[in-house]
Image (cartoon, rainbow, N blue to C red):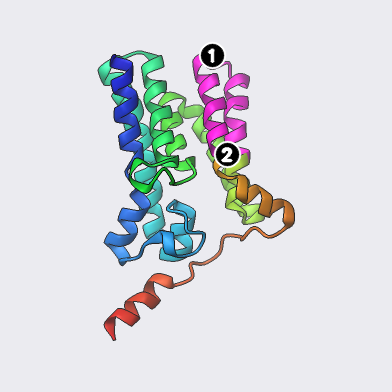
């Protein structure tokens, strides 16, 4: 019963649409209407700019942290912490409040592993940053980093349950990036660049 409570609470926490709320609060912009129409930090960067995107990233990551903490508070077992983390990722990717759509799970998953295995977090985040810097493809960096999570855990001989969490988390990220992967293979994926000033343009229209 306690595990079900952890999972349900984690799912609700993960379902909170941070990007949508931050976009509306800071810029009165619905991220679902612009750019890739995703509510994650990458689209927030393109549409709203770097500082709102950072807010979205941190808020999404904190959801993952919260899921792990829920498991620790309620049951104090590694399995409960993992259950809370997986539930928040599921909620973020398939939000209860957005008709079971949502983000892609990268920041939320990073928040989970930051609590569980911080050394792995440092390695995969560094890898992600290198790929983004070299290619400007955030989606490519996210997929590669996600796949490297369980591989890195295995290489560092982390707990077996953490390794299996890494596999599940990587699967969540890859599934949510399936359209990006198709565009990458076709050479049609957008590279990250300076934001498009959609938010500032909207503000000018409102002023008129």
Residue placed at 50% from the left, 15% from the top? 161
Q: Which residues are magenta?
A: 144-173
Residue 150 among magenta residues: yes
Residue 112 among magenta residues: no
Residue 122's place in the image compared with 135, above or below, is above
Q: Earlier in the sequence, mark 2 or mark 1?
A: 1
Q: Is residue 131 visible from the viewing direction of this image?
A: no
Location of the N terminus (image quadrant) = top left
Magenta part, dominant SS: helix
Q: Residue furthest front?
A: 99
Residue placed at 50% from the left, 19% from the top? 162
Place of residue 51 in the rendered image (x, y in percent of width and height, measured from the top left): 38, 59
Place of residue 205 in the rendered image (x, y in percent of width and height, measured from the top left): 34, 81
Secondary structure beneath label 2: helix
Please give the residue where the numbered disc 1 appears in the rendered image.
160
Place of residue 154 in the rendered image (x, y in percent of width and height, measured from the top left): 61, 20
Secondary structure beneath label 1: helix
Place of residue 95 in the rendered image (x, y in percent of width and height, measured from the top left): 38, 42
Please give the residue where the numbered disc 2 appears in the rendered image.
175
């Amino acid at each position: 019963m306690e595990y079900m409570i952890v999972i349900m609470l984690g799912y609700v926490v993960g379902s909170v649409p941070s990007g949508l709320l931050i976009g509306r609060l800071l810029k009165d912009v619905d991220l679902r209407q612009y750019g890739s129409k995703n509510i994650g930090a990458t689209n927030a960067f393109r549409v709203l700019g770097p500082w709102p995107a950072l807010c979205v990233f941190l808020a999404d990551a904190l959801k993952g942290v919260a899921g792990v903490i829920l498991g620790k508070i309620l049951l104090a077992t590694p399995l409960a912490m993992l259950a809370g983390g997986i539930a928040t990722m599921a909620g973020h990717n398939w939000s209860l409040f957005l008709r079971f759509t949502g983000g892609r799970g990268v920041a939320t998953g990073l928040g989970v592993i930051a609590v569980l295995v911080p050394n792995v977090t440092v390695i995969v985040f560094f890898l992600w940053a290198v790929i983004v810097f070299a290619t400007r493809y955030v989606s490519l960096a996210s997929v590669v980093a996600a796949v490297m999570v369980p591989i890195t855990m295995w290489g560092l001989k982390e707990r077996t349950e953490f390794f299996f969490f890494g596999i599940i988390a990587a699967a969540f990220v890859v599934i949510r990036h399936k359209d990006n992967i198709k565009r990458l293979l076709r050479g049609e994926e957008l590279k990250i660049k300076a934001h498009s000033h959609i938010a500032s343009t909207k503000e000018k229209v409102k002023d008129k």
